[in-house]
Amino acid sequence: MIRLGVVGANGKMGLQVVNLALNDKDFELVCAIDKFGAGKKLSENVFVEENLEESLVKRKPDVVVDFTQPSVIYENIKTYIKLGIKSVIGTTGLSKEQVEDIEKMSNEACVGVFIAPNFSIGAILMMEFAARASKYFNNAEIIEYHHNQKKDAPSGTSIKTAQMMMKNNDNFKLGNCEEIETIKGARGGNYSEDGKGNIQIHAIRMPGFVASQQVIFGVDGQVLKIHHDTINRECYMSGVALAVKHLYNNNKFIYGLENIL
Ligand SMILES: NC(=O)c1ccc[n+]([C@@H]2O[C@H](COP(=O)([O-])OP(=O)(O)OC[C@H]3O[C@@H](n4cnc5c(N)ncnc54)[C@H](O)[C@@H]3O)[C@@H](O)[C@H]2O)c1
């Protein structure tokens, strides 16, 4: 049985993970941490606690799952590595440099960290299809749609998609004329690395959405749209369970669920 800790346990995703931990026979929920809702009862023996380090030292989980927020995630991961606790990270908003730092720290300390900007299988396939289509189209843009309580933009999924697409094509704005934005931001944000890529990402935030993404490809005479909708947050849980079970038996740094599918 894997002793599981949930960080951000009182949030929308955290509560789903708590539910998973209470209902999967391979998991034992041993701690639930959140800066809000301390004392809330989640099971016979588990109550929400607010001090991250104190709770982890006392409860000794084998693996923690973190769904908190972009402003704290980098420091949280450093704490997990320092305490020698493996972590599955769903929280988005880490920069490319921070992910590189974490990979180095994780490998040096030999404490596994599994970061996945998206835990839903449909979204992973959408990203892989987009990467595949990138070989054949000169122009592509990404539109991502989320609920209006999401703190970071653009989404981790859209950035990961752009990174995967860039492996197959290094310029997605071929032949565009010189553009003038009469309203700043009208063309979205440009994702480039070392001057390569050039993928416009547009982020929509409004109630009604959970998480959706469309990748649009164009070439003279045809347009291809690859679209994925997340209807509810339960869809992430099979991916989270898979990541936890994988990490329990491995100590390597991993970025992206597609690496273990
Ligand atoms: N990887 C994925 O598949 C995936 C899917 C959905 C959401 N997300 C990401 O997960 C994160 C959480 O999303 P959400 O919708 O559950 O948000 P939420 O706001 O509902 O929940 C976040 C929870 O974290 C708690 N929290 C914040 N700072 C904390 C800290 N320092 N210590 C302990 N708890 C803290 C908050 O009190 C809150 O209860 C976001 O970054 C979101 O983008 C990832």
Image: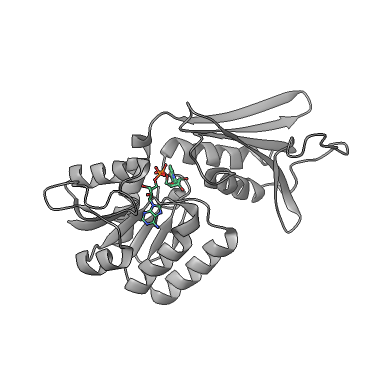
**259 lies left or right of 98:** left
Q: Is residue 238 left or right of residue 186?
A: left
| Residue 223 shows in this picture | yes
Q: Residue at x 72, y 24 (%)?
A: 222
Can you say whether 200 is above or below 84 in the image? above
Task: Looking at this view, name the residue that lies furthest to the right.
Answer: 178
x and y, in percent, of residue 104 in the image: 50, 71
Above-or-below relation of 140 to 163: above
Residue at image coords 24%, 42% = 19
Q: Nearer the viewer, residue 154 or 200?
A: 154
Q: Quadrant of the N terminus?
A: bottom left
Question: How many labels sit on residues?
Answer: 0
- Most extreme residue toward the bottom, as rendered? 108
Residue 110 figure quarter? bottom left
What residue sits 59% from the left and 38% below the top?
A: 130
Rendered image coloring scheme: one colour
71 relative to 206, above or below: below
User: Percent from the top left, x then y, of residue 96?
Assistant: 58, 59
* Residue 90: image location, x then y, percent: 42, 50
Q: Is residue 100 above or below residue 236?
A: below
- In the image, 102 versus 149, the foreground residue is 149
- The residue located at (68%, 36%) in the rendering is 141
Residue 227: x %, y % from top left: 55, 29
